Amino acid sequence: MVQYSSLGCSFNYRAVGPAAKPEVMNNCKNIKKNNAMCNCTYAGCPRHGICCECLEYHRRSGELPACYFNKTAEATYDRSVENYIKTR
């Protein structure tokens, strides 16, 4: 297991095969500030306010996080780069 710290969060990478994914330890130093600014309306999102995990998740999926979108576009949950360009 390799620990990596970035943007106030700590990741633990488990080196298990090519699809190894980070687990975020909920010790983000900025979670209160991030929660106040996060515009994601996806109910129950486990990454809400943990920007480093959100960015990593959406990048891995070929998407952008909610904070890149205006309120109307964010409500569609279409996080594609194409939708981002279309709504700019």
Image: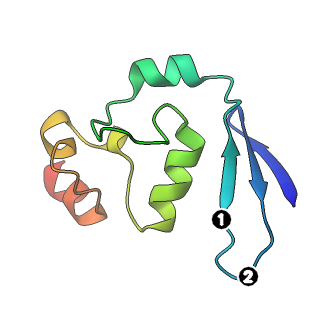
- At numbered mark 2, what does the secondary structure look like: helix, strand or loop? loop
Residue 17: assigned label: 2
In the picture shown, does residue 18 fall above or below 62? Answer: below
Where 39 falls versus 21 (above or below)?
Answer: above
Amino acid type, callout 2: Gly
Question: Residue at (52%, 17%) from the top-left corner?
Answer: 33
User: Disc 2 versus disc 1: distance between alpha carbons?
Assistant: 10 Å
Q: Quadrant of residue 1?
A: bottom right
**As drawn, is 2 to the left or to the right of 21?**
right
Q: How is the image coloured?
A: rainbow
Q: Name the foreground residue: 68 vs 36.
A: 36
Report whether 53 appears left or right of 6.
left
Q: How many labels does the image show?
A: 2
Q: Residue at x 67, y 34 (%)?
A: 26
Residue at 39 percent across and 48 percent down: it is 65
Q: What residue is pinned by disc 1?
A: 21
* Amino acid type, residue under disc 1 in the picture: Lys
Q: Given the current orientation, which residue lies at the most extreme bottom position?
A: 18
Q: Does dot 1 land on a helix, a strand or a loop?
A: loop
Q: Residues within 10 Å of mark 1 (few under 14, many from 20)?
A: some
**Nearest the eye: 73 or 16:** 16
Residue 4 at x, y percent in the picture: 81, 49
Residue 39, percent across and down?
32, 31
**Dot 2 and dot 1 residues touching (CB under 8 Å):** no
